[in-house]
Amino acid sequence: MSIMSLRLPDELAETLALLAKATGRSKSFLAVDALREYLAREAWQIEEIQKALNEADAGDFASAEEVAAIAGKWTDNAH
């Protein structure tokens, strides 16, 4: 396991300490958990963007009719 140190703004450090106390978890556990969730979300988002770019490069776009149908669903549901 690697060790990393970082500087936290005081308000973030205080919030982390309060949450650790309230949950009975260590600050390290909460920080690793938050970082794990953040990295997973960012990796997913980058992967989805890359898929979309690959589809665009392949010319795989929605037709005007498909876009209109989806837009119609949103405007019909708004009323």
Image (spheres, helix red, strand yellow):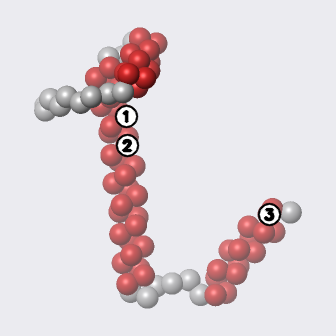
Residue 67 in picture, x, y percent from top left = 64, 80
From this view, report whether residue 77 is shown above or below residue 6. below
Q: In this view, does 45 lie to the left or right of 8?
A: right
Identified by mark 2, the residue type is Tyr
Mark 2, residues whose alpha carbon is within 10 Å: few (<14), some, or many (≥20)?
few
Identified by mark 3, the residue type is Asn
Image disc number at residue 34: 1
Does the rendering let one see residue 40?
yes
Residue at x 27%, y 28% (from the top left corner): 7
Mark 3, residues whose alpha carbon is within 10 Å: few (<14), some, or many (≥20)?
few
Mark 1 or 3 closer to N-term?
1
- Quarter that holds the C terminus: bottom right
Which residue is disc 2 drawn over?
38
Disc 2 + disc 3, Cβ < 8 Å = no
From this view, report whether residue 15 is shown above or below residue 77. above
Which residue is disc 3 drawn over?
77
Identified by mark 1, the residue type is Ala
Q: Give the camera-side residue of 21 and 66.
A: 21
Q: How far apart are marks 1 and 3 (CA)?
A: 36 Å
Residue at x 19%, y 28% (from the top left corner): 5
Does the rendering let one see residue 16?
no
Q: How far apart are marks 1 and 2 (CA)?
A: 6 Å
Tell me which corner region of the image, top left, top right, bottom left or bottom right, holds residue 23. Answer: top left
Image disc number at residue 3: none
Residue 57 in picture, x, y percent from top left = 37, 84
Mark 1, residues whose alpha carbon is within 10 Å: few (<14), some, or many (≥20)?
few
Judged from the image, the secondary structure of the residue bearing numbered disc 1 is helix
Disc 1 + disc 2, Cβ < 8 Å = yes
Residue at x 59%, y 87% (from the top left corner): 63
